Image: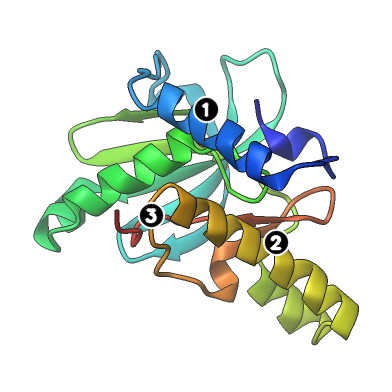
Amino acid sequence: MRYSDFGPLEITNYDSFLNLCKTRFDAKLNEKILCKETLDDFEHIEILGRGTFGKVVLVKNKRSQKQRFEAMKIIEKRKVVDKKQVQNTMTEKTILQCACHPFLTTLDFVFQDNSYIYFIMPHIPGGDLYGHMRNFGKFDEAQSQFYAAQVVLAVEFLHYLNFVYRDIKLENILIDHTGYLKLTDFGFCKK
């Protein structure tokens, strides 16, 4: 289930909701993501961003029946090993693959070749908060409260799973097609 497809949720008991999300997380921990795709199966549209270990590219899966855009995070293995970030990359994959929360990005599948690891995730079309604030200016108080609450709920859920999110910045907070936030980039999370 991907919450990004639904918009606002009616949650009557938040503790029960957290427990349900954790149960889904635990169930997915040992699940293998079967992936037959290779880099050749994707049409590269444009670069969405760059980071320390690679870049994120807007892509379309040529083999998929669904004509939707996806985000491909391309991670350079050499840089990950050189900077001793193998465990952090594994933690990021685990969170993306297993977390089922309306304010977190998810992983559709992952594959690798000799040089790179490729995370395929849903494309979040609204951009990040940094770009939004640069283009439109500051938020009013109601908007600030609306977005701050979503960030707090996302971080609270990660804490509930015993992860510490250590990279909160505007560039790591995306806006989905419904106007809600998605926290992304879990490479610096610690268990």
Depth check, front residue: 173 or 131: 173
For the point 83% across and 80% down, the residue is 136
Q: Residues within 10 Å of mark 3 (few under 14, many from 20)?
A: some
Residue 58 falls in image quadrant: top right
Identify the residue position indicated by label 1 in the image: 24
For the point 86% across and 84% down, the residue is 141
For the point 48% across and 22% down, the residue is 41
Mark 3 or 1, nearer chain start: 1
Q: Determine which of the numbered discs, if any, sits on residue 150 in the image.
A: 2
Placement of the N terminus among the 4 image quadrants? top right
Q: Residues within 10 Å of mark 2 (few under 14, many from 20)?
A: some
- Regarding residue 108, the answer to whether it shows in the image is no
Task: Give the SS element for disc 2.
Answer: helix
Q: What amino acid is at disc 3?
A: Phe
Contact (Cβ within 8 Å) of mark 3 with mark 1: no
Is 177 left or right of 104, judged from the image as shown?
right
- Regarding residue 94, the answer to whether it shows in the image is yes
For the point 18% across and 49% down, the residue is 86
Q: Determine which of the numbered discs, if any, sits on residue 163 in the image.
A: 3
Q: CA distance from mark 3 to mark 1?
A: 16 Å
Residue 38 falls in image quadrant: top left
Q: What amino acid is at disc 2?
A: Gln
Mark 1 or 2, nearer chain start: 1
Q: What amino acid is at disc 1?
A: Arg
Find residue 20 and report its horizontal and vertical position in percent.
Answer: 60, 31
Residue 113 falls in image quadrant: top left
Is 125 left or right of 97, judged from the image as shown?
right
The colour scheme applied to this rendered structure is rainbow
Q: CA distance from mark 3 to mark 2?
A: 17 Å
